[in-house]
Amino acid sequence: MVLEPEPAASADMFGDRIELARTFVAQLALHGETRGLIGPLEIPRLWTRHVLNSGIIAPLFTSGARVADVGSGAGLPGVVLAIARPDIEWLLIEPMERRVLWLQEQVALLGLTNVELRRARAEDVEHGCVDQLTARAVSALRKLIPLTAPLVRDGGELILLKGAGANSEIDAAAKQARRFSLSDVRVEIVGEGVLADPTRVVRARVRA
């Protein structure tokens, strides 16, 4: 499989940190499939489907915040966002040892001093420890809310990457949203006019 050419939007998204993004993409292209991080069909769309899809939400996070990425896996979106937003402290939470090893290698290679790694399940992480939280391709919203909402401080925010069925997931998770006192639960489409396939996120305020 051949890596797709770097899209023009990448330079604007990462600015003077574009070389870090290029290095990360090259690492994923070289090792992602063999290490079980991405599927064999993902390399030709690595930039567009994965990296830009993750990076486009970087402006949604608050400068100086502490933000968790639950189920970081290959580093999507956590490593991508840590590259794009060096002004934020990122907590990458991943339970699988081989994926944590990969994340450790990438954080060291890229010199990301704004990243803390935690090998843990989300339910084992201390409650109220972050200002905002994100996750990508982890589970349906009705299962994801109980795992993630407790980690966010009162008044903090969930910013969860979702697919085309995001509105249906919100409807199916109404009971969980009430249980964890989520408010202003909504879908936002990010990247229209920039990405051919814009990113959908579910945003919600936690207990405030």
Image: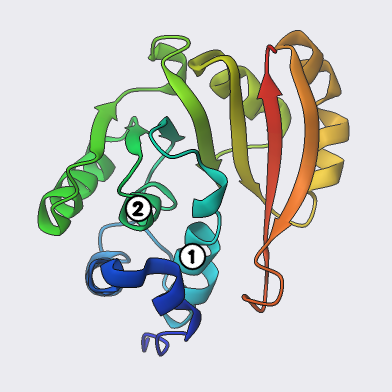
From the viewer's perspective, is 158 left or right of 185?
left
Quadrant location, the N terminus: bottom left
Q: Hey, which residue is sitting farthest front in the picture?
A: 63
Would you place residue 74 above or below residue 184 in this image? Answer: below
SS class of the residue under badge 2? loop
From the viewer's perspective, is 29 left or right of 192?
left
| Any part of residue 41 in sight | no
From the viewer's perspective, is 93 left or right of 134?
left
Would you place residue 6 above or below residue 190 in this image? Answer: below
- The numbered mark at residue 197 is none
Q: Which residue is mark 1?
A: 50
Residue occupying image coordinates x 33% and y 23%: 120
SS class of the residue under badge 1? helix
Would you place residue 106 above or below residue 171 in this image? Answer: below
| Any part of residue 19 in sight | yes
Residue occupying image coordinates x 54% and y 70%: 49
Q: Amino acid at mark 2?
A: Ala
Mark found first going from the N terminus, 2 or 1: 1
From the viewer's perspective, is 11 left or right of 203?
left
Q: Position of residue 32 (x, y in %)?
A: 30, 64
Cα–Cα span, label 2 and label 1? 10 Å
Q: Position of residue 107 (x, y in %)?
A: 18, 49
Residue 205, picture quadrant: top right
Its colouring scheme is: rainbow
Quadrant location, the C terminus: top right
User: How many C-alpha atoms fall within 10 Å of the one at disc 2: few (<14), some, or many (≥20)?
Assistant: many
Q: Amino acid at mark 1?
A: His
Residue occupying image coordinates x 45% and y 75%: 12
Q: Which residue is mark 2?
A: 74
Asked if labels 1 and 2 touch by Cβ distance under 8 angstroms, the answer is yes
Q: Position of residue 165 (x, y in %)?
A: 80, 51
In this view of the protein, which residue sits in the foreground, 170 or 156?
156
